[in-house]
Amino acid sequence: MINKLKQETKKNGFILTALFFLFPAVGQACSVCFTGKEGSLPALYLSTAILICLPLIFVVVVYKYVQKKYRERNETEQAQAGP
């Protein structure tokens, strides 16, 4: 069963590769390869910038949240401890 599946996968991969070599216009839709439509390049650049910035923004937001909770906890402990 697994061998048959592997053979079918290899066969399908070969067919797809052959089609892309025989009909290269089909494979030129990817803007990452810079062979597709040039109008989609700004969208690629924007999405790349967003994906680069999102983890940094996430880390900063989590850090600020933890910092805020830590300060609030210290203030309430100091208020409860009194003078």
Image (cartoon, rainbow, N blue to C red):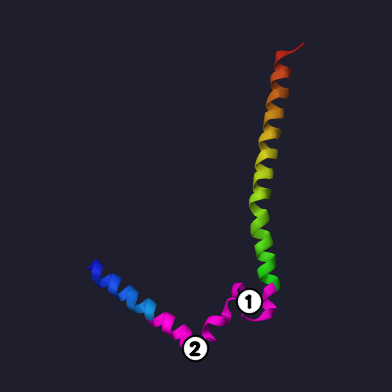
Outermost residue, left direction?
1
Q: Classify 56 as above or below 73.
A: below
> Is 61 a magenta residue?
no
Residue 10, position as x, y percentages in the image:
33, 74
Residue drawn 58% across and 76% down? 30
Outermost residue, top direction?
83
Q: Nearer the viewer, residue 15 or 79?
A: 15
Inspect the image, locate mark 1, and give the three-letter code of the amino acid beneath it: Phe
Q: Which element carries disc 1, helix, strand or loop? A: loop
Quadrant of residue 75 within the rendered picture: top right
Mark 2 nearby-residue class (10 Å; few <14, some 14–19, many ≥20):
few
Residue 38, position as x, y percentages in the image:
68, 80
Quadrant of residue 8 within the rendered picture: bottom left
Q: Nearer the viewer, residue 6 or 51?
A: 6
Q: Classify 3 as above or below 24.
A: above
Residue 21, position as x, y percentages in the image:
47, 85
| Residue under label 2 | 23
| Span highlighted in magenta in the image | 15-41
Q: Which label was assigned to residue 74? A: none
Q: Quadrant of the N terminus?
A: bottom left
> Alpha carbon of mark 2 to alpha carbon of mark 1: how far?
17 Å
Quadrant of residue 53 within the rendered picture: bottom right
Q: Nearer the viewer, residue 83 or 70?
A: 70
50 on left or right of 16: right
Q: Which element carries disc 2, helix, strand or loop? A: loop
34 on left or right of 22: right
Q: Earlier in the sequence, mark 2 or mark 1?
A: 2
| Residue under label 1 | 34
Inspect the image, locate mark 2, and give the three-letter code of the amino acid beneath it: Phe
